[in-house]
Image (spheres, rainbow, N blue to C red):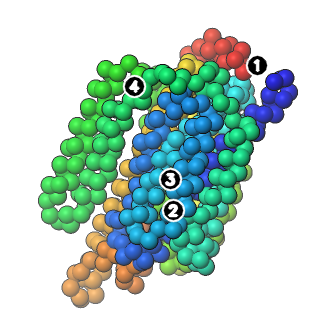
Amino acid sequence: MPPPDRAKRRWWVLLTVMLGTVASIMSSTIVNVAVPDMSRVFTLGQERAQWMSTGFMAAMTISMLATPWLLSRFGYRLTYTGATLLLMCGGISGGLAGSYEFVMAMRVVEGLAAGVMQPIPSILILHAFNIKEQGKAMGIFGMGVVVAPALGPSIGGFLVEHFGWRSIFFVVVPFCVAALLLARIFLPVTAPGGISTDREGSRLDWTGLVLVTVALLALLNGLVGLHAGHGGVPLGAFALLATAALGALAFIVHLHRTARPLLRLALFRVRRFAMASMVAFIYGMALFGSTYLVPVFMQLGLQLPPSQAGAVLLPAGLLLAVTIPIAGRLADRLPIHRLVMTGLSLLALSFALMLSVGLGTALWILMMWTAIGRLGLGFILPSLNLGAMRGLDLTLIAQASSTINFMRQLGGAVGVNLIGIFLEWRLRVHGAAAAAGAGSPAQPPSAEMGSLPVQLTEQLPAFHEAFAVLAFITAGAILAARAMKQPAAEVPHAQRDQLSRRQQ
């Protein structure tokens, strides 16, 4: 195509992948508002309820490692279309489910589809836009994507309150339909870099995929099992954690011995990428842990109805949508490690300020503390992926994008699990202390969220302690972000010239 038409087309390509990513993120976050309602319907305890988020995150984490192979084998259009169809089918089937087990199965299906989608936008941006426009493109893409978590809780709260929990699963359908129509028109059929797909090429690294799946599921179940003992010796949990460690070790050994591994360990020899991966993991723990914690805190700790809890998050989400394109432009001009450090500092401050929130706190203060955290996210989101992948060879972009997203989602899957377990533990501790102080036998609160006693409102310290843990975790990522600093002399000029020629 002539250069002017090609320039216009790439923005339509960006819009196409944005719609699918919005649908996948909304399917991830909107369910959190419905956790209390679904817990009452299916009589779920805290540990089982959190698996609606953790199961999605685990499936998403595993499947995104297969994205580079899928793109090289089937190309952008077929890969993206297949993932979008899978996400839409999972949403419709989940809304029609009659049991918790089937809901969980559909959450896993949605997670698998979302994992394939997540790395694609970064790959497209780094191949389709020149180095001076990548920050702008990432910022505009991020602005569209954050509309999902910004509006998701508000829409979800309204739907749950008026139409029940089933309605939230159907929200993704219109986004998926629009993404499918645009993908047929605008997405290229080629693999990344404009090369032809390799239908007869190498096979997927199934051994690596099985090993990482076993390691991740054993890790998450082992973490839950550590707390499930409630004072006993959880031998099964230790066995699962040992299995996770062995699975991770076997996965790393396998990667060294395989010609076309699922994940390239050579990427971690690049200092900047290794530090960015560490930031992504820690940041994922804090971000997704808070995505689970905040709605539960508002509804169970502060006794807010679902619609009001969603409305509290709306101004912060809109601020995030405004911040991201600004931060994206700054990423083209300022050192990226400074933007990431600024964002992490604001996010940690937001978690720390939540310790001051109680039953008598005005809603506008709660909105303000939440907005500070979203402002921090606005600085991190468009900068981290660019900071990790700038300076890498173009042939490594697809693998690097999948890996950095994998590290963030792995941190998120662990973070959701740990925060849920930590909160359950502290609720029981404070519940027993409150009961003992009242002169009654020290009985912990019921494990069923739908039957938690009214005294739970007196146990705000448990939620405060969970926010303190998130603040500590986020602060730790600042040190890794500082190590992302890379002198200009270390950025290969040949790579810049190569990139410019490919994108002209």
Which quadrant, please, contains the C terminus? top right
- Contact, CB < 8 Å: mark 1 with mark 4? no
- Contact, CB < 8 Å: mark 4 with mark 3? no
User: Which disc, if any, is residue 93?
Assistant: 2
Please, what secondary structure does the residue beneath circle 4 have? loop
Quarter residue 49 falls in? bottom left
Q: Amino acid at mark 2?
A: Ser
User: Which one is earlier in the sequence, the residue at label 4 or at label 3?
Assistant: 3
Quarter residue 264 falls in? top left
Please, what secondary structure does the residue beneath circle 2 have? helix
User: Which disc, if any, is residue 504?
Assistant: 1
Please, what secondary structure does the residue beneath circle 3 have? helix
Q: Which residue is mark 4?
A: 261
User: Which one is earlier in the sequence, the residue at label 1 or at label 4?
Assistant: 4
Please, what secondary structure does the residue beneath circle 1 have? loop
User: Marks 3 and 2: which is nearer the front?
Assistant: 2
Residue 356 x, y percent position in the rendering: 49, 68
Label 3, residues with CA under 10 Å away: few <14, some 14-19, many ≥20: many
- Contact, CB < 8 Å: mark 3 with mark 2? no
User: Marks 1 and 4: which is nearer the front?
Assistant: 4
Q: Which residue is mark 3?
A: 110
The residues bearing labels 2 and 4 have C-alpha atoms spaced at a distance of 34 Å
Q: Nearer the viewer, residue 91 or 301?
A: 91
